[in-house]
């Protein structure tokens, strides 16, 4: 798999956020991830926080990119190891793949394989992706908002300091 190249970041609206357990039984704390959708309907995932120690990337990962990475395993039905998911990222933190695996398991896009440290690609990514797109609420732009008279508010006056005599 080739290393993805950074592309201009689209405007992504967060449609959901979850705090979940990490996959490793030795892991401390929980992690938080976000699901986002852009104006074109692209679905993205991003790790937002880690309660334990360890670095991670907060970059938005396109679901289409993740699908491309796991496609050979989806086609063959073979289980995949967590390090395979490293190829979905541009930035290279050691924890990225493990955190992404936890996110994908939580969303139901990956399932536990045998042995349990491996993952199997779940069958219905299309339904999950369509559900996320339905949650997207387009933001009003100046062209689409109704014009209304702007009311200028005067800022509150700063109290004057007392003068000493």
Image: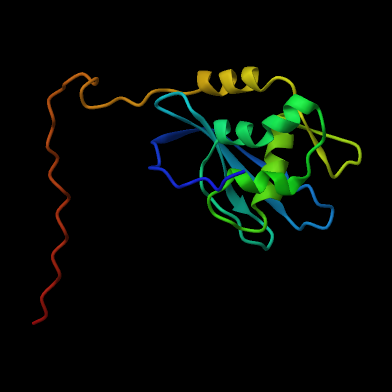
Asked if residue 89 lies left or right of residue 125, the reply is: left
Considering every residue shown, the one lying at the far front of the view is 2
- Snapshot quadrant of residue 65: top right
List the single residue furthest toward the bottom: 165
User: Residue 95's spot in the image, x, y percent?
Assistant: 67, 55
Q: Residue 124, image x and y in percent?
A: 70, 19
> How many labels, in total?
0
Q: Looking at the image, is 45 positioned above or below residue 164?
A: above
Q: Residue furthest right?
A: 115
Query: Residue at image x 71%, y 29%?
Result: 109
Horizontal placement of 16 versus 159: left or right? Answer: right
In this view of the protein, which residue sits in the foreground, 134 or 77?
77
Relative image position of residue 127 (x, y in whole percent): 64, 17
Residue 69 percent coordinates (x, y): 64, 37
Quadrant assignment, res 45: top right
Quarter holding the N terminus is: top right
Q: Is residue 70 above or below residue 100?
A: above
Residue at left offset 40%, top offset 42%: 9
Taking the image as drawn, is residue 65 in sight? yes
> The C terminus is located in which quarter?
bottom left
Q: Left or right of 160: which side holds 61?
A: right
Question: Going 65% across and 48% down the picture, which residue do you hit?
Answer: 86
Q: Residue at x 68, y 39 (%)?
A: 103
**Residue 112, relative to residue 22: is it above or below?**
above
Coloring applied to the structure: rainbow
- Answer whether residue 31 is visible to the viewer in this image: no
With 140 as the anchor, is 165 left or right in this view?
A: left
Which residue is situated farthest in the left direction here? 165
């Amino acid at each position: 798999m080739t290393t993805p190249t950074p592309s201009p970041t689209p405007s992504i609206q967060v449609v959901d956020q979850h705090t979940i357990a990490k996959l490793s039984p030795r892991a401390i704390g929980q992690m938080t991830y976000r699901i986002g959708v852009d104006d074109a309907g692209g679905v993205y995932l991003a790790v937002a926080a880690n309660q334990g120690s360890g670095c991670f990337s907060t970059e938005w990962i396109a679901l289409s990119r993740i699908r491309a990475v796991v496609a050979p395993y989806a086609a063959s039905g073979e289980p995949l190891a967590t390090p395979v998911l490293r190829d979905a990222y541009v930035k290279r933190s050691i924890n990225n793949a493990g955190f992404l695996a936890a996110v994908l398991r939580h969303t139901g896009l990956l399932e536990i394989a045998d042995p349990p440290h491996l993952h199997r690609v779940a069958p219905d990514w299309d339904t999950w992706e369509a559900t996320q797109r339905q949650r997207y609420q387009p933001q009003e732009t100046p062209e689409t908002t109704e014009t209304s008279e702007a009311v200028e508010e005067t800022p509150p006056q700063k109290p004057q300091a007392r003068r000493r005599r």
